[in-house]
Image: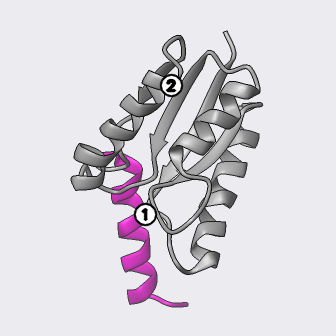
Amino acid sequence: MQTAIIVFAHGSSVESANQAVRAVTTEVARMGGFSLVETAFLELARPDLAEAVDSVARAGAKRVVVVPFFLTLGIHLQRDLPRMVLECQQKYPTLKIDVTDPLEGHPALRQIVLERAQKALNPC
């Protein structure tokens, strides 16, 4: 079964921020050996989730894994993302769409915060 990965971020009016998310997506594809990967945005940037799902469905995906590039399970992930996924499911009823947990709670985040703090305290 062809599986697509969609990294789903908020989106920004600052294009360099959107490009940074796209760069993460590119690295995820490379590191994971994934051949069908897209970036999608909630707002302020393109493609949105529906457009990304359209793209991977046209490319033959039978399953989509949406990875929220959000730190916490806030309102966008509790309200907006489920609604958007439901709309995609209605358009593509045979497409299996799974959504992972947000980044919150992952042990690597604690390490990243610690490293940033230590670097600020010891800039050498």
Q: Residue at x 66, y 43 (%)?
A: 38
Q: Nearer the viewer, residue 109 or 40?
A: 40
Q: Is residue 93 magenta?
A: no
Q: Is residue 86 left or right of residue 36?
A: left
> Please, is residue 25 above or below residue 119 in the view?
above
> Please, is residue 1 above or below residue 33 in the view?
above
Q: Is residue 102 left or right of residue 56?
A: left
Q: Residue at x 50, y 65 (%)?
A: 11
Res 99 → quadrant: top left
Q: Which mark is residue 67?
A: none
| Residue of label 1 | 112
Tell me residue 49's x, y (percent): 52, 44
Q: Secondary structure at mark 1?
A: helix
Q: Nearer the viewer, residue 11 or 113?
A: 11
Task: Identify the residue at the far front of this view.
Answer: 91
Comes first in the chain, label 1 or label 2: 2
Q: Secondary structure at mark 2?
A: helix
Mostly what secondary structure, the magenta segment? helix
Res 117 → quadrant: bottom left
Which-is-in-front pick, marks 1 and 2? 2
| Residue of label 2 | 91
Q: Amino acid at mark 1?
A: Ile
Q: Amino acid at mark 2?
A: Lys
> Please, is residue 20 above or below residue 38 in the view?
below
Q: Write the start and end of the magenta stretch as one range.
A: 105-124
What colouring method underlies this structural image? one colour
